[in-house]
Amino acid sequence: MIVSFECYCTTQWGDVLYIVGSEPVFGCWDTDGALAMKCIAPHKWRVEVEIPDAKFRSFTYKYFLINRENTLVWEHGKSREFIKPSAPFTTVHTKDLWEPGNNVQFPWTTSAFTKVL
């Protein structure tokens, strides 16, 4: 199975977004083994990972940023979980939004918005 991870993250020139997680392909939570993501559009980052179908049922992951000053900045909040779909897909796409952790609240995550959905 190929899993495509997309993350929308406001970055500056020279910043690089990474994904790290519980599976060996993601570095087993070691930032030195994390996967660098590619900026495919302004503030839109992507990486594709091939994972053998029988290898997992679920795994956890998180994003971090290495900024142009070479400082590691973790995404705020708890780790994300990927659960393998029960259908036999060959490719799965995930789309995430970077959690800034500076009490920025996105309008679509407020109760005023979520309660109407």
Image: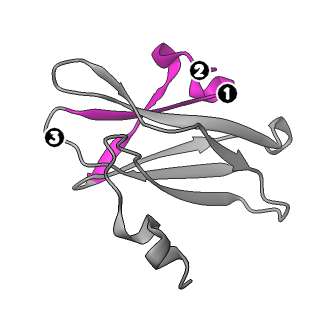
**Number of residues whose C-alpha sits closer than 10 Å to that of mark 1, classed few (under 14), some (14–19) or many (20 or more):** some
Would you say 55 lies left or right of 31 here? Answer: right
The amino acid on which the numbered mark 1 sits, given as a three-letter code, is: Ser
Q: Report which quarter residue 17 is drawn in.
A: top left
Point out the tag, 1 or 2, that comes first from the N-terminus: 1
**Residue at coordinates 31% horizontally, 51% vertically from top-left?**
104
**Number of residues whose C-alpha sits closer than 10 Å to that of mark 2, classed few (under 14), some (14–19) or many (20 or more):** some
**For the view shown, which residue lies furthest in the front direction?**
112
Q: Where in the figure is residue 82, as x and y percent of width and height?
A: 68, 47
Q: Which residues, given as a range, are shown in magenta? A: 15-40
Q: Which residue is mark 2?
A: 29
Q: Where in the figure is residue 105, as x and y percent of width and height?
A: 35, 57
**Number of residues whose C-alpha sits closer than 10 Å to that of mark 3, classed few (under 14), some (14–19) or many (20 or more):** few
The amino acid on which the numbered mark 2 sits, given as a three-letter code, is: Trp
* Dot 1 and dot 2 residues touching (CB under 8 Å): yes
User: Under tag 2, what secondary structure?
Assistant: loop
Q: Which residue is mark 1?
A: 22
**Residue at coordinates 59% horizontally, 20% vertically from top-left?**
29
Does residue 58 appear in the picture of this structure?
yes
37 drawn magenta: yes
| Vertical order, 32 against 103 (above or below) | above
Q: Nearer the viewer, residue 53 or 63?
A: 63
